[in-house]
Image (spheres, rainbow, N blue to C red):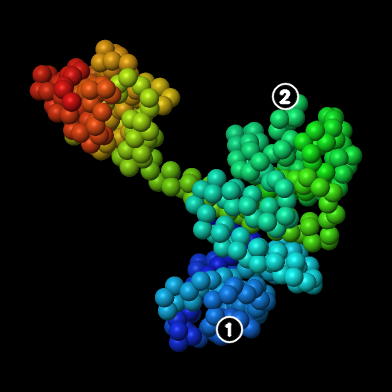
Amino acid sequence: MTSPHPPLCGIVKVGVDGLIVGVSANVLELVGRAREELVGSPLASLLETRLRLTGSATVPADAALRTRSGTKHPVVVGLLPEDGAIQSIAILDVSPASPFERGFATATARGSRGQERLQILLGASVGFAGAHDELAAADLLADVAKRAFRATHVSVHLRREGDLVRVAGVNPLAEHWPEGQQPAGNRTLLGGEVLVVRTPEEARYFMPDIPIDDMYRAAGIHAAIAAPIAYDGGPIGAFLCFFDHPREFDDEAVPLAEALADQAGQAITRIRLEQTLRRASMIDALTGLPSRRLFEDEAMLALSAETPAVCVLFIDLDGFKAVNDQLGHAAGDVLLGQVGERLQSMVREGDSIGRFGGDEFIAVAAVSDESQGRALAERIRAALARPFAGLPSGLSITASIGLVVADRESEADFTLEHLVRAADHAMYEAKAAGGNRVSAGPY
């Protein structure tokens, strides 16, 4: 999925001969050029820079990328630690359309403090590009913001299922916050702009409905700066920097906060999209149940639950081949969808059920003993024995179910593979006995 905004970070890799050996997809998108066109070409064919490709220090510098149309796209570049004979160059978009440019423009106009902030932003961009989950991105944001602003505390809050939840850092106001009041960061999230609080009295201006100035004093906080985290205008969360001493904010503060929030917003949005696509790819299209790979991941969580015992059910449909043979595979697919709906309705939260392949399904559930496992298996058997819509009277579907129950104390070393194998064996016993029944086997 292509981002509607230029990416903030990319990587170009160069060999000792000065030729390009690798270009990240973000950079290719930014310049509109193909990887085959660039790999093997001199670095100068892509990048105009004053950086020397020798030395190990990370030295941010302004540069320009050469686009397909021949225009030059402004960037900031920095050397990353060498990997053998390969030198990696981090690329940051600082075009006028990029929020990062506001922080960059003021940083370069100032002295060592500005240069320090610039290096922090450069390192953060590389870190956000490599973050693989939301918590890692939130932890990185908390750490970077604390260093960039030299804050006493930083808290990061993300919107989850309509609620704003602190996921990283420390919120010094938490123990003083009124019960039932909207959480810290909500005002920033909804306002959509960076808030600068220079005194506790200023905090009361932004939140007049609660005695937040008294809360600041009780927590020992003198000043704060808070920025909303959003992507394409949609609110994601907010981060707040707190200071336990009087603090003046220069004209770099707001652009710096916006740049960090934008980097975090893009990273979190990318992570969420990747997780959505990954999960969608592991959902069985016919039944809506987890495919075998996702089921195994979820089943491991069920196996790790602190319960006296765990049961595994191996479910095989009786009569499914006849449906395919007489009505066709399209009718069989519709039937599998109905089976999936019934199976989903039978398991509890925390249990796991998935399609194992063909007309075979597996369920893993935490139970107190074998009788509870058998009761679950019988409910599933009865549910699948009810008539299915679209099947003529001469065709019927039932289920042969193999059941195994492992006691945690006596079977402490059980594994999912062994449990499934034992349940599969018990299922064949149920099938051999005529089907439409539950057969329990030893683990």
Q: Is residue 172 above or below residue 124?
A: above
Depth check: give the residue in front, 419 or 58. Answer: 58
Give the image quarter of residue 352.
top left
Q: Is residue 421 left or right of residue 308?
A: left
Please state, as top left, top right, bottom left or bottom right, where the C terminus lies in the image. top left
Give the image quarter of residue 123.
bottom right
Which secondary structure, mark 2?
Answer: loop
Kindly identify which numbered label has been placed on residue 52: 1
Depth check: give the residue in front, 61 or 281. Answer: 61
Tell me whether circle 2 and circle 1 mark residues in contact (CB < 8 Å).
no
Q: Which residue lies at the image location 60% right of the left edge and 37% below the top edge?
A: 160
> Label 2 belongs to which residue?
180
**Image x and y of residue 402, in percent:** 20, 24
Q: Is residue 22 left or right of residue 136?
A: left
Name the mark nearer the viewer: 2 or 1. 1
Which secondary structure, mark 1?
Answer: loop
Three-letter residue code for mark 2: Gly
Q: Is residue 242 above or below residue 121?
A: above
Q: Which residue lies at the image location 33% right of the left edge and 30% below the top edge?
A: 303
**Image x and y of residue 98, in percent:** 70, 64
The residue carrying pointer 1 sits among few (fewer than 14), some (14 to 19) or many (20 or more) residues within 10 Å by Cα, namely: few
**Image x and y of residue 223, in percent:** 82, 46
Q: Which residue lies at the image location 75% right of the left edge and 45% below the top edge?
A: 242
- C-alpha span from label 2 to label 1: 57 Å
Residue 208 shows in the view: yes
Q: Is residue 54 above or below residue 90?
A: below
